[in-house]
Image (cartoon, grey):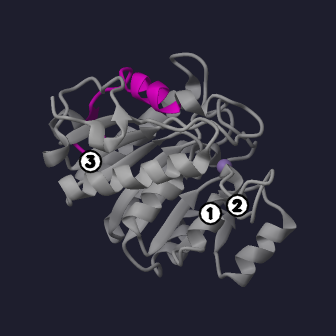
Amino acid sequence: MREMEFLYTYESLKLEFPMSDVEDGDFVILGIPFDGTTSYKPGTRFGPTLIRQATLNLESYILDYDVDLAEVRIADVGDLAIVAGNPLETIKRGVGTVEEIKKINPNAMPVVLGGEHSMTYAPVKALNPKSYVVFDAHLDLRESYEENPWNHACVARRISELGIKVTEFGIRSGTKEEVEYARENDIPWVHARDYSITNFKEIVKKLPEPIYISIDVDVFDLSMVPSTGTPEAGGLGFWEVIEALEWLVEHKRVIGFDIMEVAGMELGDVTALTAAKLLFYMIGMLSK
Ligand SMILES: [Mn+2]
């Protein structure tokens, strides 16, 4: 077992099949179990553990891609040691940890499991993509929320302020100010009602590369993700999101992704099962 202290993480439940070391992993999983600024449902601190546990329900073989994840080099460095109640300090640790992973293995693709969406800033800051593609019910473009610029309702704005091109899909919640900010800053966003694979391709094909993908699980209809920080009715279906992601990874260079806002209090949670299936599909489509 290698020394993990430099990664600021502690060990967590592993996936079911044999895992790789960070040095030779094509994918490196990092949990960020932060739960500090969600204003409605709590429980994102358990997200990474619930997702990993939910993978035990899944076959490692992905029918659609003829890929067996047991043969893919996947490392898992466990969960970030978060600073409870302090998103900015936790983000700093997250940035350092993702940078460290890339230093150890420049070819590895970081995969972050959340944890609330504010934490997405960490891998994005560390990886510095040209574009940020997010599936989310919410615009997350507030200047500040509840007097905290690092609230999960502000993450897309913080990322756009880094000069990274932000595009958003599955949206059905935001404020007038957020819509204006999106217009003024040339941030394309597609309402869940208007979403189609056609308009997804239209927008994404023009994006500069490399691309970072963020999935806030609340993009899905809330029947699939009842345990998430801020559930919203009227979301996208599982295969709609998978189809878009398949097209994206086939046509664009992706350097990292995350699955965020999984909350819950008990093993076998429906939201975690949705997120685990998504995780397996994303690694599968990036491996085929
Ligand atoms: Mn959201």
Q: Which mark is residue 27?
A: 3
Q: Say if the magenta span includes residue 37.
A: no
The percent coordinates of residue 134 (x first, y second) are 55, 60
Q: CA distance from mark 3 to mark 1?
A: 24 Å
Q: Residue at x 77, y 36 (%)?
A: 40
Res 1 → quadrant: top left
**Residue at image mark 2:** 139
Q: Nearer the viewer, residue 41 or 66?
A: 41
Disc nearer the start of the sequence (3/1): 3
Is residue 244 at least partly visible in the picture? no
Q: Residue at x 45, y 26 (%)?
A: 49
Disc nearer the start of the sequence (3/2): 3
Res 34 → quadrant: top right
Q: CA distance from mark 3 to mark 2?
A: 28 Å
The percent coordinates of residue 64 (x first, y second) are 31, 43
**Residue at image mark 1:** 156
SS at badge 2: loop
Is residue 112 at least partly visible in the picture? yes
Q: Amino acid at mark 1?
A: Ala
Residue contact between numbered discs 3 and 1, judged by CB atoms under 8 Å: no
Q: Is residue 98 left or right of residue 237?
A: left
Give, as a single range, the part of the protein colored magenta.
47-67
The percent coordinates of residue 97 (x first, y second) are 35, 49
Q: Residue at x 43, y 56 (%)?
A: 123
